[in-house]
């Protein structure tokens, strides 16, 4: 309004107007006309700003006693392949005749107990998992040119999976099995021992045949739906051997089977295993790159980059697999391992839609605060943080499927304390067994996210409130979302539920925690003060909104009606 007047200052008052102008002065009449226009402009601007400010205040709910959260069923992020289970049988023993190891513990149970557990998992009122992981231990071939024995060390695992598959098929559900090489036969390593660090290069094709022969047995003899071979179990972790790779200076049986897998070996073996499968007519079985300890290592340690450079290996690979054990403390040093999508997204930029499965993750959180006899003792706690571990794998690592570490465990069947002793079911040497807290927390998730659904976008304005959402559009399953309150206080959450096919939701809740302690017999969880997949009734949307009071340390599932 005031054009090039070289003004230093304009002071406007209702009664008086002063102009300080360095060079020239306009005629008073012209100035007054300009000033009137200026006042009108400023008044309009002030009114507009006031309107926006007042509207902004009224739009916000300044009472944050209700935590804002959202699940948007129209914003589909990726296809979901399902949740799964893993029965671990032979995992450390070097001599099965001397020690017939069975970490899953079915060998300690009577037939009725085994079938009851299988019903809890695969039955109509059970978890109904879509995925199963089966290990291939190194004891199926004792010597070069020998006869394969796929039965002796896998009897309980195969019984578990076959019964579960039969139960699932009767319901019209199809399982997807990934089988993971736990370690090669000892004679294939340079150390010529089980759990030798280095594969002898001359045995690369024989190792591919070892894996494929096992898959062929499961496919043709057991009639099990094997979908993928995974090359290794935490094979990137070179830290588990002395620098020279010699086993003489370490207790080799103190860890589960393994062998070191470099990124280059991974790529080469993907190609060789793909070719070996095709030669046996197993074209329907895919190959995965093996399973690093966590998603951070898959990306940061060069495994994803190796595959991005080796296009032949990438084309031969079917899905990405890794473990999802979270170690997010920035001071964790070499064990640092947050949920990361660096490696998966690097490969998805080349192959859009490439699926990724988390094939092992922790049931428990570790706590160092317990003092016993003036010593710090680590405690292992299963609580609502388990759902947060799953949330991180889904929304940070961006997986399409998830299988936790050993679903059923027997403490005496692991040399040294298991570093991840949380579980869903625990078996004891005296033949007793019990359902642990992990079972109920996992059921909150498995019944919500089913094969064929889509992961959808969610948010929460409090980091202690985490939301996982699954769209059932195009499937027989309802829209569902899972709310975890990992805090120590009850929180009221105001959900905005966008574009769901349902106006009513059935809610189920689990709360409380399970602290692992080594015992010799079942204690049977005393948990009367908490919920174990408890039916919380029906909730009806008010427009797009649902208000829910989430107890401290709880997980609640809402499934559409």
Image (cartoon, rainbow, N blue to C red):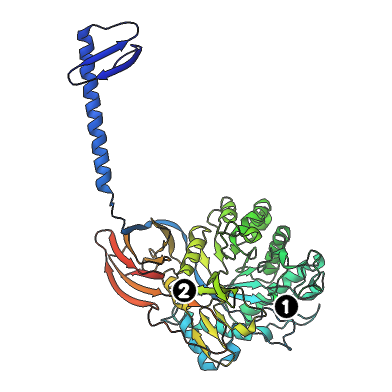
Where the C terminus falls, by quadrant? bottom left
Residue 88 visible somewhere in the drawing: yes
Could you tell me which residue is drawn at 72 percent across and 80 percent down?
A: 140
Residue 48 x, y percent position in the rendering: 24, 33
Residue 127 x, y percent position in the rendering: 45, 77
Residue situated in front as seen by the camera: 166 or 531: 531
- The answer to whether residue 376 is left or right of residue 147 is left
Could you tell me which residue is drawn at 62 percent across and 55 percent down?
A: 299
Residue where numbered disc 2 is placed:
442
Within 10 Å of the Cα at label 1, are there few (<14), some (14-19), or many (20+) other Cα atoms?
some
Residue where numbered disc 1 is placed:
253
For mark 1, give the secondary structure. Answer: helix
User: Could you say which quadrant of the image residue 508 lies in?
Assistant: bottom left
Instruction: Specify which label sits upstream in the sequence, 2 or 1.
Output: 1
Of the residues tagged 2 and 1, which is closer to the observer?
Answer: 1
Where the N terminus falls, by quadrant? top left
Per the rendering, the mark at residue 59 is: none
Residue 195 x, y percent position in the rendering: 75, 73
């Amino acid at each position: 309004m005031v054009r090039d007047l070289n003004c230093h200052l304009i002071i406007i008052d209702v009664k008086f107007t002063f102009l300080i102008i360095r060079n020239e002065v306009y005629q008073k009449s012209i100035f007054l006309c300009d000033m009137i226009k200026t006042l009108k402009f400023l008044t309009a601007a002030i009114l507009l700003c006031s309107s926006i400010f007042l509207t902004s205040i009224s739009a916000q709910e300044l009472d944050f006693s209700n935590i804002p959260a959202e699940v948007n069923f129209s914003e589909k992020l990726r296809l979901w392949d399902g949740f799964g289970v893993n029965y671990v049988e032979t995992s450390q023993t070097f001599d099965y005749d001397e020690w017939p190891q069975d970490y899953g513990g079915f060998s300690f149970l009577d037939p009725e107990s085994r079938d009851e557990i299988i019903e809890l998992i695969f039955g109509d009122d059970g978890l109904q998992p879509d995925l199963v992981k089966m290990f291939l231990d190194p004891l199926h071939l004792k010597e070069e040119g020998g006869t394969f024995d796929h039965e002796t060390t896998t009897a309980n695992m195969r019984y578990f999976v076959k019964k579960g598959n039969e139960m699932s098929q009767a319901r019209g559900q199809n399982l997807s099995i990934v089988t993971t090489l736990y370690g090669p036969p000892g004679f294939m390593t340079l150390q010529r021992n089980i759990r030798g660090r280095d594969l002898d290069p001359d045995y690369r094709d024989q190792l591919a045949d070892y894996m494929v022969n096992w898959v062929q047995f499961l496919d043709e003899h057991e009639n099990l739906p094997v979908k993928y071979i995974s090359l290794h179990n935490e094979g990137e972790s070179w830290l588990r051997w002395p620098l020279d790779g010699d086993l003489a200076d370490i207790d080799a049986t103190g860890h589960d089977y393994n062998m070191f897998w470099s990124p280059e070996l991974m790529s080469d073996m993907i190609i060789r295993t793909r070719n070996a499968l095709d030669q046996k007519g197993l074209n329907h079985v895919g190959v995965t790159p093996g399973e690093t300890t966590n998603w951070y290592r898959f990306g940061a340690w060069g495994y994803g980059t190796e595959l991005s450079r080796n296009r032949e290996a990438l084309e031969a690979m079917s899905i990405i697999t890794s473990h999802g054990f979270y170690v997010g403390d920035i001071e964790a040093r070499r064990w640092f391992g947050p949920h990361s999508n660096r490696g998966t997204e690097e490969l998805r930029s080349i192959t859009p839609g490439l699926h990724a499965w988390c094939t092992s993750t922790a049931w428990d959180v570790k706590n160092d605060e317990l003092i016993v006899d003036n010593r710090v003792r680590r405690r292992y706690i299963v609580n609502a943080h388990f759902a947060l571990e799953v949330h991180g794998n889904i929304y940070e690592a961006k997986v399409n499927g998830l299988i936790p570490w050993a679903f059923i465990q027997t403490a005496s069947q692991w040399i040294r304390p298991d570093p991840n002793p949380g579980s869903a079911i625990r078996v004891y040497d005296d033949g007793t067994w019990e359902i642990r807290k992990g079972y109920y927390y996992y059921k909150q998730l498995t019944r919500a996210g089913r094969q064929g659904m889509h992961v959808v976008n969610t948010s929460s304005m409090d980091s202690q409130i985490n939301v996982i959402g699954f769209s059932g559009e195009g499937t027989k399953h309802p829209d569902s979302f899972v709310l975890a309150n990992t805090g120590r206080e009850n929180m009221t959450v105001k959900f905005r539920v966008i574009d769901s096919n349902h106006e009513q939701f059935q809610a189920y809740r689990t709360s409380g925690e399970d602290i692992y302690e080594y015992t010799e017999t079942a204690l049977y969880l005393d948990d009367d003060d908490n919920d174990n997949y408890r039916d919380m009734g029906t909730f009806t949307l008010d427009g797009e909104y649902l208000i829910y009071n989430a107890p401290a340390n709880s997980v609640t599932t809402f499934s559409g009606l």
